[in-house]
Amino acid sequence: MTVHLVKLCVGAESVSDLAAWVEKRSGDNERVGRGRVHEHVTRMHPRREAALLDGGSIYWVIKGVILVRQRLLGFERRDGADGIRRCAISIDPALIPTKPQSRRAFQGWRYLRSEDAPPDVKKGSRKNPPPELAIELAELGLL
């Protein structure tokens, strides 16, 4: 059964901030021969790796709202320069907009069941507010 990850997008003020970061990181990875993938390095390795790789995504929370997701491609154990073992999460660089869903702050990442995941926004859909408006609505407690 597929599960997903939810992660705070720390430091990003908008989906465009995340897009710029993804473009830079995936370009860097391509130049060093890892392919055009976005990687996010975290301390913990997910225990539910098989379920995550069965069609799972990482849903990014930007300023308290899930606004976008990326498909998960793989996990790799890596030792940092400080000797601490970490997990590099390989992610498809394509950003897929989702219906805005408010989330409280948390540390690390959380698992998200498929039935609880916000649906994707169809291209050109006018049913959902633009990401910047969704963040403002969430800050006002209206989303």
Image (spheres, rainbow, N blue to C red):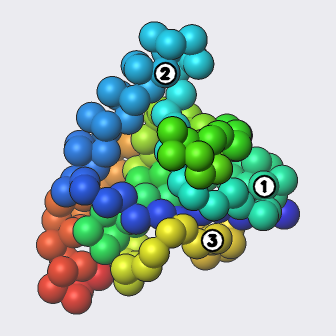
Q: Which of marks 1 and 3 is nearer the N terminus?
A: 1
Distance between the Cα atoms at labels 1 and 3? 13 Å
Camera-nearest label, 3 or 2: 2
| Residue 70 seen anywhere in this rendered image of the structure | no
Disc ID at residue 112: 3
Residue pictured at 70% horizontal, 43% vertical: 77
Left of 53 or right of it: where is 117? left
Left of 127 or right of it: where is 49? right
Dot 1: element:
helix
- What number of labels is visible? 3
| Quadrant the C terminus occupies | bottom left
Q: Earlier in the sequence, mark 1 or mark 2?
A: 2
Q: Nearer the viewer, residue 36 or 141?
A: 36
The residue identified by callout 2 is: 29
Distance between the Cα atoms at labels 1 and 2? 22 Å
Neighbours of disc 1 within 10 Å: few (<14), some (14-19), many (20+): some
The residue identified by callout 1 is: 49
Left of 101 or right of it: where is 42? right
